[in-house]
Image (cartoon, helix red, strand yellow):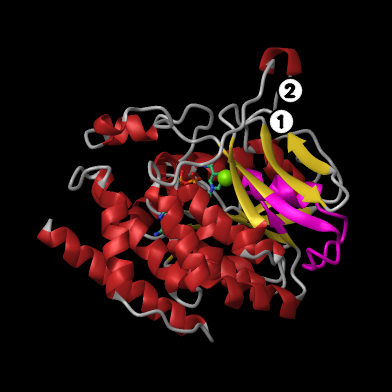
Amino acid sequence: MQNITILGSTGSIGTSTLDVVARHPNRYQVYALTAYKQVDLLFQQCVQFQPKFAVLLEEGAVAQMRARVKEAGLAVEVLSGVEALEQVCIANEVHAVMAAIVGAAGLRPTLAAARAGKKILLANKETLVLAGNVFMEAVRASGSALLPIDSEHNAIFQSLPHHYNGDMHGSGVRRILLTASGGPFRNTPLSELQHVTPEQACAHPNWVMGRKISVDSATMMNKGLEVIEARWLFNAQADDIQVVVHPQSVIHSLVEYVDGSVLAQLGNPDMRTPIAYGLAYPERIASGVCPLDLFKVARMDFVAPDFERFPCLALAYDALRAAGTAPAMLNAANEVAVEAFLDKRIAFLDIPKVISKVLNQLPVSAVHELDDVLEADARARAAATALLGDA
Ligand code: NAD
Ligand code: MG
C-alpha cells in the first residue's frame, strides 16, 4: 500500500489522479489532499478518500472546511498555509507526491518533496522552469524518483532507454521531438487573434485542462515551458529539442536515435495514462482510458511551428538560451499576463508583449540557490504588473 499526497487535488490533474487512485484501492491510500479554496470539492474528496490531512490556502475556506469536517464527523485534520503544504509532502508515512498545483505556487512544496527523497509525480512544470537546476540537484542529492506527468515528457521518458542517465549523446539519442497540438488558434486568421476571448482561448480542441494551462496552450507558451521542462528532465540543450505541431495529439512525443530509429508513445489524449504510468512505475495498471482506435485516428499530420504566429514559443527558447534567471522571469511575467487576460484586462496579443518587455527590462543573473529564483520571480511579477498599469 502506497501513501500519496496530492497537491492541487481539486484541479484537472488532481481529479484525474483521484480517478485512477479510486480504481486501485488495494494499491494506493490518500494521505493528504490540498486545494487553494475549493471547499465543496475538497470536502467531497475527503468523504470519498478519507485522507489524514486536507490543506487549504485561503483563510475563509479553512474555517468553512473545518466546520464541515466537524459536522460530518470525518477524521480529517484541516491545515492551512504553505508550511502545511510542505508538511504533508515530507511526512514519513508519505511514499509519493503528485505535484499538481498550477504555477509558481507549486514550487515550494514540490521542492520540499524532492529534498525529502519522495517519489515525485511532476505535473507542475513551472517548478522546473523556475528552478530547474535547484530542483534537479535536490532530486539527485536525495535520490528521489522523478516521474514526468506532462504527457509529452511522459512519452519521452517512455521512449528513452531504460535507466537513461542524462547522457543524451552517450545513449545514442540524436534529438527529442516534442509534439504540440497548436491549440485552438492554429488556423485562426491573424487579424482575429487580437479579439479572441478567454472562453475561446480555453476551448482546447483535444485536452480538457485548467484555465491557465489552456491559455498557455493557445499562445503556445505551454510548449515553450515544456521545452525548458525537457531541458532539465532529460539534460538536453535547446538545439536538441524540436517542437513538432501534430494537431491530432495522438503521438505524445518522440525520441530520435543516431541509428535512424524514432520511438514514440501514442494514446488517446487523456492525462490518466501518464498519471497511471507515474503511479505504478515500473509496473502498468489500468487507467480508465479508452484504447486507441487507429482506424478512427486514420491520419496524423505534422508541421513545423510558426514562431511569428506564436511569439511566446520564441520567447521561451530565448529565455532557455539566456539561462540563469531568464526562464523564471519568463514564467512570472507569463503568469501575470495570463491572469490579466483571463480577467479581460488585456488582449490576447498583449500577452507576449508584456513578457517581452519584462525580459528586455530586467537583467539576467546566475542561479545558485532558491533565493536567486524567488527574487527574479518577484522582480518580474512587479515589472509585469507595472506594465499592466500603463496599459
Ligand atoms: P487547475 O487550475 O485545474 O488546478 C490547479 C490546482 O492547484 C487546484 O487544485 C487549485 O486549488 C490549486 N491551486 C491553485 N493556486 C494555488 C495556490 N496559490 N496555492 C496552492 N494551491 C493552488 O490546473 P491543472 O490544469 O490541473 O494544472 C496543474 C499543473 O499541471 C500545472 O502546472 C499544469 O501546467 C500541469 N499540467 C496540466 C495538464 C492538464 O491536462 N491539465 C497537463 C500537463 C501539465
Ligand atoms: Mg503537455
Task: Report x, y in % for residue 336.
Answer: 30, 58
Residue 267 circle label: 1
Given contact means CB atoms under 8 Å apart, are the residues at marks 1 and 2 in contact?
yes
Q: Quadrant of the C terminus?
A: bottom left
Q: In the displayed structure, does residue 88 sit left or right of residue 299?
A: left
Q: Residues within 10 Å of mark 1 (few under 14, many from 20)?
A: some
Pointer 1 or 2: first along the chain: 1
Which residue is identified by label 2?
292
Residue 291 position within the rendered picture, expressed as x and y whole percent measured from the top left: 75, 22
Q: Is residue 198 left or right of residue 179?
A: left
Left or right, 390 with reference to 115: left
Could you say which is closer to the camera, residue 42 or residue 217?
217
Q: What is the span of residues highlighted in magenta in the rendered image?
A: 147-176
Residue at the top extreme, as displayed: 295
Q: Amino acid at mark 1?
A: Gly
Question: For residue 244, what is the image quadrant?
Answer: top right
Q: Secondary structure at mark 1?
A: loop
Residue in the foreground of this view, choosing between 321 and 209? 321
**How many marks can you see?**
2
Does residue 4 lie above or below 177 as drawn?
below
Q: Can the viewer see residue 304?
A: yes
Q: Residue at x 51, y 66 (%)?
A: 320
27 left or right of 83 in image: right
